[in-house]
Amino acid sequence: MGTVHARSLEPLPVGGPDFGALGEEAEFVEVEPESKQEILENKDFPLDRHICTGIMWQRRKSRERLLSPLTDLAPPTVQQFSMPTHSCLVGQAGYNSWFFFNSFPCLCTLRLGHQTGLGGSSHRAQAERWGLPAWTQVIALQELLASPGAAGRPQRLCLCQWPAYLGTCGLWASPTASMSAEPQGTFLCLRQHLTGATLPRPLSQVMRKSHEAREKLLRLGIFRQVDVLIDTCQGDDALPNGLDVTFEVTELRRLTGSYNTMVGNNEGSMVLGLKLPNLLGRAEKVTFQFSYGTKETSYGLSFFKPQPGNFNRNFSVNLYKVTGQFPWSSLRETDRGLSAEYSFPIWKTSHTVKWEGVWRELGCLSRTASFAVRKESGHSLKSSLSHAMVIDSRNSSILPRKGALLKINQELAGYTGGDVSFLKEDFELQLNKQLALDSVISASLWGGMLVPMGEKPSSIADRFYLGGPTSVRGFSMHSIGPQSEGDYLGGEAYWAGGLHLYTPLPFRPGQGGFGELFRTHFFLNAGNLCNLNYGEGPKAHIRKLAECIRWSYGAGIVLRLGNIARLELNYCIPMGVQGGDRICDGVQFGAGIRFL
Amino acid sequence: MLRRSICLATAEPWPENATLYQQLKEEQILLSDNAASLAVQAFLQMCNLPIKVVCRSNAEYMSPSGKVPFIHVGNQVVSELGPIVQFVKAKGHSLSDGLDEVQKAEMKAYMELVNNMLLTAELYLQWCDEATVREITYARYGSPYPWPLNHVLAYQKQWEIKRKMKAIGWGSKTLDQVLEDVDQCCQALSQRLGTQPYFFNKQPTELDALVFGHLYTILTTTDELSEKVKNYSNLLAFCRRIEQHYFEDHARGGISVRLS
């Protein structure tokens, strides 16, 4: 939970709008209007079921305590600036919106309460002087005062409301006459629905909603820190039974860079990374990574833009070059590609639609590569459209305790250009259930099929592979299925299933701390990979996939690495081994993100 | 690595299914590659070893050295005429066994001459002469690939060849100078050949195969270069002789264009 400094030490109110008497003196003064400021808060507008937000850029005497990096700066001085002759629209958002004016640490306050009526005439006059359209209703006018560190950037922000039926708010920033018309700094606007009721809400709900809002803000990836303070309304303009919820945010730096050197796999490389977390003010992210190694060079540039107010809808464009070496197939692959994808949620599912164009170059990894792999060398161009759907109700992606995951992915290549033409389908299903004694039983099923369209056979780079510490354990990496002279060629259809029982470590060493990261696990894996003859019917396909099943069982220890990866050390006994498969019976170590 | 593969090779006789890989004959293959492929085919015919020619659009990338042609014999893959000659010798077939040391040295010298002059001139004509590049080379080289890959690969190859030309000093030559060099090379070859049927009197050697491959391709596919070759009648007769003896007799249809 975020830092919620709830002022009341009494137990949570049973119900209703009674916030009780908060007798303590304010330790942090949130709203302290100074003489030079104008906070014109219109209390009489039809909030009704909605909550209005506004930005307040304050000079406060207790500021130093909250924003410690500024303590060594000179005491703030209020700057006088002339009334602007023009103002320009900085941004626009839905009715319940949060506004942030970036480049400086800023405060956002949220006021809730029950208000009625429309704006007063004084606000109207003010708005006209500022050159705002006549039909806007001024909700709050606030002058922003520049921080001492940022020279020449005074801004005036005015939060207005369009006529209610349009349901939008506008944020106007009026620069001083000496500046250009463009507002300085960046502007981020999110839509945050905090559904209101006609009555103010109990404190517990406010705290929960504030926490959710804080999580959403952190997910944007543009703030280093988000703190939440909830207090009763204070000051001259305090609303009866109102709460002040203040979000204090500190932004990340506009440009961050990283430089690493990596050594591994007989190769050393230098990796340079650049990140702009908030390029245009709406949490657009641009990342660039460049890796220069003794053997290979690779790079990736990506631009990511979420829809303002709805982070789950986002769009990203990637440009990349990656090289990979696959010793199990004696194959080397260099991909240079461009992809554009759009993600959106529908009810509980998350969908991604992607177009990808890749120039693939395949080559043999050594002179002893088999001729079947040598025949695949050369260049090809794949241009494909793909769609993925994910439903994930698990409580964690690594070692979940409950919930299920279903991923369905399809890819159609060849109809938007390129010379590779196929239809590829694959799915992943995982079910988890918690049992007695802190154990979890988990079942998973993977499957996929690749149908080449046209006369050309499928390429080794598109086919499926099976086997290894992350799929059917007990077999070497990708060493199941069709092979030629020891090089595994992959297959056009596969299925794999696993049944796991996770239990805490015996005798529970390190319980409650380090020991919680480990689990013992007992598993049973099975799978098959083959090429189908697409002329025959589905019965023949099922029969082909059901014969020569490889399976294995065993036990091991799993270590959880953060929320991203896991390490496994297993003792495996492979069974059903077909001629040509390479096994790894006995102890097998695996590290990865996605496990069967 | 080559020596080890030759040691392995001596164990087995020449199989029936030996295959030679080159680019697509009609649409893709270029002058220099065609010459090299024909030289290898002629050499194997002269050794009386059966070979099947298979055309694949990615032959250049399949080859272990990046150059065509290459042969797939048993489970060995060998590319380019020089290594193929060594490989075939290890299997017990050789055309130059009857030569003494001096003649062998001379043969090597003439093969170097052909590679340095004729082959380089062919590469120049293909990749550095703007007219040919625009009309013929770009279209042919990129023909198996979709847009935009065809342009990217052709441009990449041209840049590579031009860099190589600059390194050997041909970057600044004009087409006329190149034609002059070709003429001088043909003169040297013609003088060495004289009135003999083959370069080393009665029996053909790998030099004959190499010269035939290049001259035949030049005569049948180019205009300016073939004019230079046609000046030397004994070279024309030489090419016709080999064509009739080794390619028509076996009725393989390996050569699609006949000499006039």
Image (cartoon, rainbow, N blue to C red):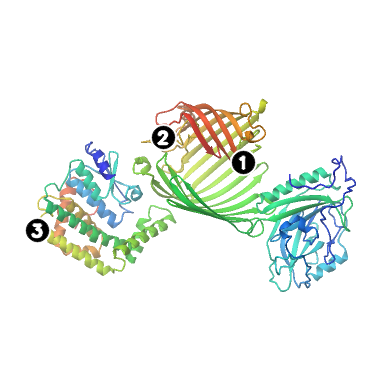
Residue sitting nearer the eye, A66 or B18: A66
Residue B27 picture location, percent across and down? 33, 54
The amino acid pointed to by label 1 is Asn
The amino acid pointed to by label 3 is Thr
- Chain letter behind tag 2: A
The answer to whether mark 2 and mark 3 are in CB contact below 8 A is no
Residue sitting nearer the eye, B86 or A549: B86
Query: Can you name the residue that lies furthest to the front here?
Result: A72
Question: Quadrant of residue B152 in the image?
Answer: bottom left
Q: Earlier in the sequence, mark 1 or mark 2?
A: 2
Question: Quadrant of residue B259 in the image?
Answer: bottom left
Q: Let me know if residue A94 appears in the view.
A: no
Determine the secondary structure under disc 2. Answer: loop
Residue placed under numbered mark 3 in the picture: B195
- Chain letter behind tag 1: A
Residue placed under numbered mark 2 in the picture: A482
Residue A476 picture location, percent across and down? 45, 34
The answer to whether mark 1 and mark 2 are in CB contact below 8 A is no
Determine the secondary structure under disc 1. Answer: loop
The local crowd at label 3, few if under 14, some if 14 to 19, many if 20 or more residues have their Cα within 10 Å, is some
The amino acid pointed to by label 2 is Pro
Determine the secondary structure under disc 3. Answer: loop
Name the side, left or right, on which B128 lies relative to A147. left
Q: Which image quarter holds the C terminus of chain A?
A: top right
**Distance between the Cα atoms at labels 3 and 1?**
84 Å
Residue A316 picture location, percent across and down? 59, 53
Q: Given this view, does label 3 or label 1 mark the residue nearer the observer?
A: 1
**Distance between the Cα atoms at labels 2 and 3?**
59 Å
Residue placed under numbered mark 1 in the picture: A563
Same-chain check, marks 2 and 3: no
Relative to A120, is A115 above or below?
above
Q: Which image quarter holds the N terminus of chain A?
A: top right
